């Protein structure tokens, strides 16, 4: 928003507030103004928007999630205990596994049965590796299958996350998909695969509802044309054993915002002689990386900072464009968006261990990028059904960095912690008015909004989350909640004077949330948002 436009809007807002009984504000012009419209409810924010992704790649599973039962590192049946404990606190709603690209190379049968008997195979990411990444155990390149379906289910159970499995379309037949579903979901004693699962330690079925049918089928998942992938999808998604569950099948969506892929796939599925109506097809996967694999995770200029945020903010356009194309075929919008990979992706060099392919440090910049993505999902609760951040640990945009016994929470962890009130809450429309930020990137003048965010209500608690993208200017901000009786309010902010700040083994608390002063005046909250910050306000209603 331009400054002149902003001033007009904030003056109007001031007048509105005066009518609302807050005369004190009439004399002030804040730097930013937020108006929450409680009567304009947008829908329930799916808890599954607060999900994570764990692929067999680099240091995500081995050296990340899984340390092994015999490890000196504290563990729960082989799972890194410190991470499980931390994850539980942020209530991860859903966990995607085993890929990513690895999903279309993965044979689930290799990861069941006694661990000692499991075969060793080449991991998909061997193709993108450098010999230096081969550690002494070789797990990052040669998949030992120590961590398989049962270990993953145990991880989900312990952290409270719903499992979301991506099935192999490129290199296994459809029958193996059916069999994996049967292994996971068939009732005790009912099938040979159920008995195998029981022998592996779980009498009760796992009740896995979310299944991805391939991954990036336009790329590593088979380089399909959309028409061909639609045929494969039909074959894989027809007559999957249900076992009384409402399965949620996720089709492999576009590369970024490629609407041609979406048009051509949906046309095949929804129109003509071969229209295919399957109530279980409920998800359309979208991957959106802010990808400048030339830019460093730790060393960056202001232009590179704003560019990453702008790229991430493009998710709003992707959501709107994809939704609009899908609606041309799926008129009732039965299928929702599943943003199952998102986050900034930098060049290599800041990984905490050489074996961690795509490992990168996570700074305050990335926390803002993650927060603005979550805010975009919150603002579109009718469209986005699931989102899983890529990836949980030792990879792109991670929440945790680990190596052997070392463990640290990145700034992203604190964003998921701050935002968890939104899970399952009613989203409310909120208008954010602040001057745009102007910056120069690659010798061009560019612009990004100065303030954005989302608001929701659960019972008598209203949560407002906000990103102040401006590197230099704090914002004195008025947040108006018209028609609500505000009893009390608290605020926390995640910030640091240096946007390159990040948490390390030696200094794990450099970027952690701190309390922020917030005043209530009638229906208006008044607070100052630090430059380059993410802030959460929690308001208790009377
Ligand atoms: O997250 C890393 C990789 O990025 C995933 O395996 C793939 O789906 C995407 O291209």
Image (cartoon, rainbow, N blue to C red):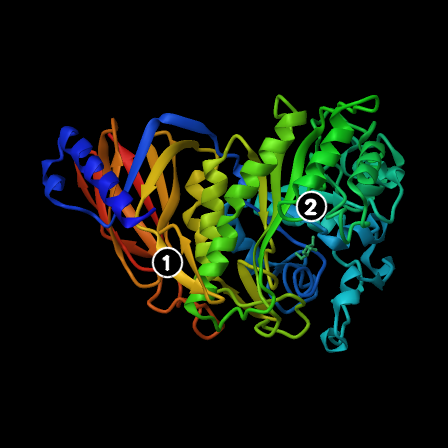
Instruction: Please provide percent x and percent y for residue 78.
Output: 67, 59
**Which callout, 2 or 1, points to the residue nearer the camera?**
1
Looking at the image, the residue that sits furthest to the front is 444
* Label 1, ligand 1: CB separation under 8 Å: no
Q: Determine the CA span between mark 2 and mark 1.
A: 47 Å
Mark 1 element type? strand
Comparing 471 with 10, the one in front is: 10
- In depth, the one of 135 and 18 nearer the eye is 18
Q: Is residue 42 left or right of residue 262?
A: left
Q: Position of residue 308 (x, y in %)?
A: 50, 59
| Residue closest to the eye, 350 or 82 | 350
Question: First in sequence: mark 2 or mark 1?
Answer: 2
Determine the image quadrant of residue 379. Answer: top left
Residue 468 x, y percent position in the rendering: 35, 53
Q: Is residue 207 visible?
A: no
Q: Which mark is residue 153?
A: 2
The part of the image, by quadrant, that contains residue 479 is top left
What residue sits 44% from the left and 33% below the top?
Answer: 425
Check disc 2 and report its element: helix, strand or loop.
helix
Label 1, residues with CA under 10 Å away: few <14, some 14-19, many ≥20: some
- Answer left or right for 379 relative to 173: left
Say if 468 sits above or below 349 in the image: above
Depicted 25 relative to depicted 89: above or below: above
Which of the labelled discs sits on residue 438, or is there none?
A: 1
Residue drawn at point x = 84 percent, y = 39 percent: 228
| Residue at (80% x, 35% y) in the render | 230
Residue 370 place in picture, x, y as percent: 49, 53
Are there few (<14), some (14-19), or many (20+) residues within 10 Å of tag 2? Answer: many
Residue pictured at 33% horizontal, 67% vertical:
497
**Quadrant field for ligand 1:** bottom right
Instruction: Work out whether residue 542 or residue 371 is closer to the camera in this orientation and state it.
Output: 371
Task: Assign the C terminus to one quadrant of the image.
Answer: top left
């Amino acid at each position: 928003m331009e400054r002149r436009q902003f001033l007009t809007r904030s003056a109007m807002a001031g007048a509105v507030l005066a009518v609302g009984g807050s005369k004190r504000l009439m004399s002030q012009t804040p730097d930013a103004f937020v108006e929450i419209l409680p009567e304009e409810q947008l829908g329930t924010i799916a808890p599954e928007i607060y999900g994570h992704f764990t692929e067999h790649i680099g240091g995500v599973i081995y050296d990340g999630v899984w340390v092994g039962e015999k490890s000196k590192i504290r563990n729960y049946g082989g799972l890194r205990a410190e991470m499980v404990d931390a994850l539980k606190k942020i209530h991860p709603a859903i966990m995607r596994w085993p890929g990513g690209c690895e999903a279309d190379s993965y044979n689930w049968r290799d990861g069941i049965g006694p661990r000692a008997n499991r075969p060793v195979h080449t991991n998909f990411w061997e193709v993108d590796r450098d010999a230096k990444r081969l550690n002494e155990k070789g797990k990052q390149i040669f998949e030992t299958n120590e961590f398989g379906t049962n270990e993953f289910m145990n991880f989900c159970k312990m952290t409270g996350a719903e499992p979301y499995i991506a099935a192999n379309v490129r290199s296994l037949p459809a029958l193996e998909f059916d069999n994996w579903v049967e292994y996971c979901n068939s009732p005790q004693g009912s099938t040979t695969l159920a008995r195998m699962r029981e022998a592996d330690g779980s009498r009760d079925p796992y009740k896995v509802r979310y299944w991805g049918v391939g991954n990036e089928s336009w790329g590593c998942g088979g380089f399909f044309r959309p028409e061909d992938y639609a045929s494969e999808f039909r074959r894989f998604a027809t007559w999957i054993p249900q076992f009384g569950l409402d399965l949620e099948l996720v089709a492999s969506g576009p590369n970024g915002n490629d609407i041609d892929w979406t048009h051509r796939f949906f046309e095949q599925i929804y129109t003509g002689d071969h229209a295919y109506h399957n109530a279980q097809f409920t998800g359309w996967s979208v991957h959106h990386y802010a990808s400048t694999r030339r830019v460093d995770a730790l060393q960056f200029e202001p232009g590179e900072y704003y560019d990453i945020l702008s790229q991430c903010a493009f998710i709003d356009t992707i959501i709107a464009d994809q939704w609009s194309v899908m609606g041309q075929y799926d008129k009732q919008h039965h299928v929702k968006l599943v943003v199952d990979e998102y986050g900034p992706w930098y060049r290599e060099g800041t990984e905490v261990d050489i074996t961690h392919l795509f490992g990168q440090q996570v700074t305050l910049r990335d926390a803002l990028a993650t927060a603005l993505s979550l805010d975009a999902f919150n603002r579109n609760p009718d469209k986005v059904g699931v989102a899983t951040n890529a990836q949980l640990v030792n990879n792109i945009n991670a929440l945790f960095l680990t190596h052997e016994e070392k463990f640290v929470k990145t700034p992203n962890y604190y964003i998921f912690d701050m935002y968890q009130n939104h899970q399952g809450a009613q989203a409310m429309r909120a208008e954010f008015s602040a001057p745009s930020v102007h910056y120069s990137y690659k010798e061009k003048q560019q612009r990004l909004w100065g303030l954005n965010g989302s608001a929701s209500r659960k019972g008598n608690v209203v949560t407002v989350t906000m990103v102040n993208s401006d590197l230099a200017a704090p914002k004195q901000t008025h947040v108006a909640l018209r028609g609500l009786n505000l009893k009390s309010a608290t605020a926390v902010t995640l910030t640091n004077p240096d946007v390159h700040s990040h948490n390390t083994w030696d200094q794990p608390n450099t970027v952690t949330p701190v309390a922020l002063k917030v005043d209530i005046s009638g229906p208006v909250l008044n607070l100052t948002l630090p430059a380059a910050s993410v802030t959460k306000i929690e308001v208790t209603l009377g």
